[in-house]
Amino acid sequence: MTIDGVIPSPTPHRLGVHLTDGGAVVGVYSGHATGVDLCLFDDAGTETRVPLHGPTAGVWHAFVPGIGEGQHYGFRAHGPWAPKKGHRYNANKLLLDPYGRGIEGDLIPMTHERAAQLLSNKDEADTAELMPRSVVTAEPGGSWQTPHPRIPWEDTVIYELHVKGFTQQMMDVPEHLRGTYAGLAHPAAIEYLTSLGVTTVELLPVHAFASEPHLDHAGLSNYWGYSTMGFFAPHAPYATQEAQAKGAQGVLDEFVGMVDLLHQAGLEVILDVVYNHTAEAGWGDRVLSWRGLDNHDYYRSQPNSPGHYDDTTGTGNTLDFTHSRVVQMAMDSLRYWTEEVGVDGFRFDLAATLGRTGHGFSTRHPFLVGITMDPLIGGTKLIAEPWDTGMGGWQVGNFPAPMAEWNDRFRDKLRSFWLTDTARGGRNHPTAPELATRLAGSTDLFGHTEPPLMRGPVASVNFITCHDGFTMADLTAYNGKHNEANGEDNRDGTDNNRSWNHGYEGETDEVEINAYRRRSIRNLLGSLLLSAGTPMLLAGDEFGNTQKGNNNAYCQDNEISWLDWSFHPWQADIRSTVQHLIALRRENRVLRPSEFYDGHDPRPDDDRHRADSAWFRADGQPESEDWWEDPATRVVQFMRSLSEDGEADALLVINGTRTPVEVTLPADEGGAWELVWDSAWESPVGVAVETVQPGDVQVVEDLTVQLYLSR
């Protein structure tokens, strides 16, 4: 069947399917194809093929009359089957639109008897019955009324959550909304987030995704979502049944509504985005979209061997960010989610891949320059996961301003200091210098810019835990991973946990062990929220959520991963501690600096007598080189001051030893100190503020953090 009136698109450069008067303009990149068909499907599943015009600069395009909102479609690409040259064309494979704003239907699991037909091979079996469909949607732009919150970086507290897992068991959310976009935007969920004090929710992947074949075979699914099937379409299963019944437009509208309601509550929305690879996996695996349209151009191949992928992601394929069309696709996707959907920023998974040239990683890669300089994207919060699995893949500190980066050195050092070093009774090399560097904003990683220090400590996204690894409670309860439920004989997941079970593996009724586990949780939370930098909390850590020792729960769409909201009293106490610490951070600018410390002495005309930062020994004397280099140094005092009227000074006292110590507060001519938090407290609720003077001696309990403020 053919459609009359199909003419070349007046905008052949515009990719995707976009509604216009009388129909839609269509564009898809397939640079090495000899022909591309637009495939339209009616309600009965009958397919109509529309040959597109082109190629114009590799784009096949047309104006197609009669297309409207809700139209189901896909593509078929004709071209050479020459795998050794990187070409894997087969017009029998129905392909999703890389720019599709909606996706409806399920991808047939690899356990299905016909699923092998999806594999990249030269066969005559048609895959239309096995594939979901791209769907035409109306542009959502202007459908929200609330402006972006625009939280300054120095005021930001990030909360990483999974859309489904956050509300799936939240009893205050109506059952039909649990685990959905609408559930996250429900007043009960929003009240929880705002009362906790976080400013920014970072959503695990919500781009449409598929499960990997090996998970299909095992009866599991990709829960985290790092297996993208479409960079423009929201993941439909996270929408309510009501929205899904309305089709792709209903799913999109629910997502946009969620963003707007979170904005109304003053919360920013950041998306965890996966532009480094796709759900198509290795070179001979499934054909869903990009592989069938132009395998050679979309995917990174080994030098001089276009038939073999250069995989720097560990997933089987890597999108080729040396190709302009791949960069364009990612840029267009970011603009769409920012301008049309209204999100506030992006966390880039395995971001080192996005900056790879033919010669390795480059800070000046066109994609990195593009997103930071773009007038729209550059004004959002941009966060890099600054590594991948390829050679030279660890690039922490090397991304351009104004990007921030996940700081794994902060994670590892704070875990080691409070857990593994404590368990083994210390180390035989100095540990205090790096501890101090991490607490003060990691200038060694983020300060080497031109001009120097321009990124500031806010470029360091400090975290102790994230979705990948142990929860904070499990860090204190397990020495090793327990991933048996993943079906890989506990081989998956990292062994570099830097955890300490405090003497017993797993849950226990032993009172003393549980008391020290709770203190360790509070020490980790305090170190995170009172350090210079941008803190990120993993959802559930604020009340001691557990995954029963699973440190790689990517395939556990069940109670292992879903947050359990049935609190014990001690969990409510931990949450009160987090609320208290975030409130202290919000109310005292000295705890959230936007610039690196210079350590200079106070000016002669400054009557507060305190430098912007200074370190002291347990006896109250200033730090010395010998003290820094002593492996036994595990008691430190970190003083901070803004030297501005109306702003408090702060003194962080850390006892990393397993015995109580007497600490002399630094003697100076500054104001009195108030003890506003002590990790020895089970809860800060109802604790009276203690006032002490400079030079006073305080007994600090073993393995404890204290915060003093001088107002």
Image: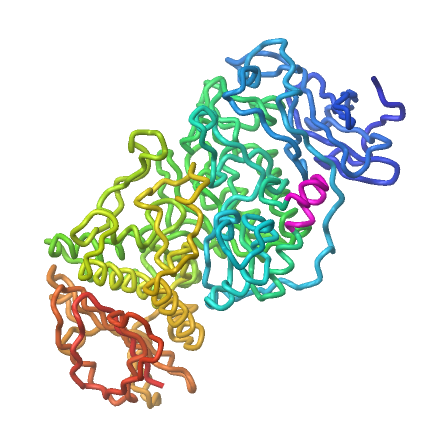
Does the magenta run of residues contain 254?
yes
Up the image or down, 18 lies above or below 185; here it is: above
Q: Give the colouring mode of the picture.
A: rainbow
Q: In which quarter of the image is the N terminus?
A: top right
Up the image or down, 478 lies above or below 586; here it is: above
Tell me which residue sits at (53%, 14%) in the image: 83
> Which residues are the magenta region?
241-255
Tell me which residue sits at (50%, 42%) in the image: 365
**Residue 592 placement, left or right of 630:** right
Up the image or down, 332 lies above or below 406; here it is: above
Up the image or down, 427 lies above or below 111; here it is: below
**Residue 236 placement, left or right of 689:** right
User: How many numbered tags mark residues here?
Assistant: 0
Q: Quadrant of residue 496?
A: top left
Does the magenta run of residues contain 135?
no
| Magenta span main SS | helix
Residue 659 vs residue 386, the one in the foreground:
659
**Residue 207 placement, left or right of 606:** right
Q: In which quarter of the image is residue 67?
A: top right
Tell me which residue sits at (31%, 34%) in the image: 484
Q: Quadrant of residue 81?
A: top right
Q: Position of residue 394 (x, y in %)?
A: 35, 42
Q: Position of residue 591 (x, y in %)?
A: 38, 72
Q: Position of residue 20 (x, y in %)?
A: 83, 40
Q: Quadrant of the C terminus?
A: bottom left
Residue 551 vs residue 270, the one in the foreground:
551
Q: Position of residue 525 (x, y in %)?
A: 33, 62
